[in-house]
Amino acid sequence: MTRVLVPVAVLERESVSPGLISLLGTVDVTLLGYHVLPEQTPPDQARLQFEERATAALEDLSQEFRAAGGDADHRLVFTHDREQTIQRVAGEVGADAFAVSGPTGDVDRLLVSLSGDVDVDRVLSFVERLVGDRDIGVTLFLAAGAGTPDDAAADESERTAPDDADGARLEAAADRLREAGVEATTELAEGGSPFDALIDAAAGHDAIVMAERAPSFRSLVFGDEGERVAAASVGPVIVVRDAESDASAAGTSSEPGE
């Protein structure tokens, strides 16, 4: 079963929009309630003080996800390193993707970025499972010549002009989704910043699906790039994990008292 990890700053009353909950109704969800502690505060002390309240909030949110159709469980972590903790938990629960929360209503159309050297098969498989038999359309997006789909440092001069291969790549991906019963269109961006092109293309879409790109797991999901995409698009972003992420997550360990 497909599983999506949804990190929530539970003690900061971070919410998950109803649209994102509904969108994830075809998959299983693990809610990761986290709270980042000051360096001098031991996790055991925070857990003793806040566990009951945080767990109640996570259970309420889990019930909303279950009502949307999928299964949902939750974990609670008090940590000094949010990124490392989320990476570790993602590996432990076998998450296929992460959700960066953002406001959205009913999801009628997804923007799916295939820019850069990403695992297209993995992304499309995830999208097929996410959409299921629902009436949700997909726009497949590709910034021609992009080093990364949201690399602000990649300026126009560093990009190559689109060629037939870019268009063929998009059309092949669209054909695959159509064969799976998903309504799909394509958009090929030419010139300019890949990040700006992605944000421009986000207009008219309710959520973005993009791929994780090695080796910038942390930066894509939690750092400047991923959060900029979520903030600039004013909506949720779902990042499909790379197959190598599990190996990376296996190398992390929990903090004492987590």
Image (cartoon, helix red, strand yellow):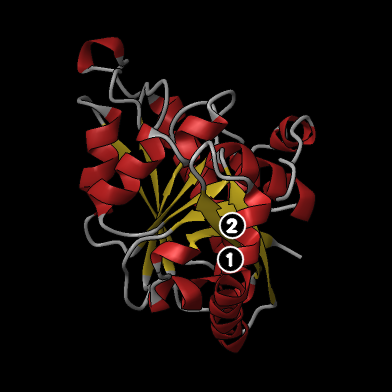
Q: Indicate whether 252 appears above or below 66.
A: above
Quadrant (top left, top right, bottom left, bottom right) of the N terminus: bottom right
Image quarter of residue 127: bottom right
Label 2 with label 1: CB-CB less than 8 Å = yes
> Crowdedness of circle 2 by 10 Å Cα count: few (<14), some, many (20+)?
some
Q: Which residue is painted at 69% across and 35% down in the image?
A: 245
Q: Position of residue 160 (x, y in %)?
A: 32, 15
Amino acid residing under circle 1: Gln
Q: Which residue is painted at 58% across and 89% down in the image?
A: 67
Please indicate whether residue 229 sits to the left or right of residue 135 in the image: left
Of 176 and 156, the residue lying toward us = 156
Q: Indicate whether 188 appears above or below 177.
A: above
Q: Examine the rendering and report whether any part of residue 114 can be seen.
A: no
Image quarter of residue 162: top left
Q: Which residue is painted at 56% across and 32% down in the image?
A: 217
Q: Helix or strand or loop: what does disc 1 sit on? A: helix
Please indicate whether residue 162 sits to the left or right of residue 53 in the image: left
Q: Residue furthest bottom?
A: 67
Amino acid residing under circle 2: Ala
Q: Helix or strand or loop: what does disc 2 sit on? A: helix
Distance of mark 2 from mark 1, alpha carbons? 5 Å
Q: Which mark is residue 46?
A: 2
Residue labelled with disc 1? 49
Q: Position of residue 219 (x, y in %)?
A: 47, 31
Q: Position of residue 135 (x, y in %)?
A: 46, 78
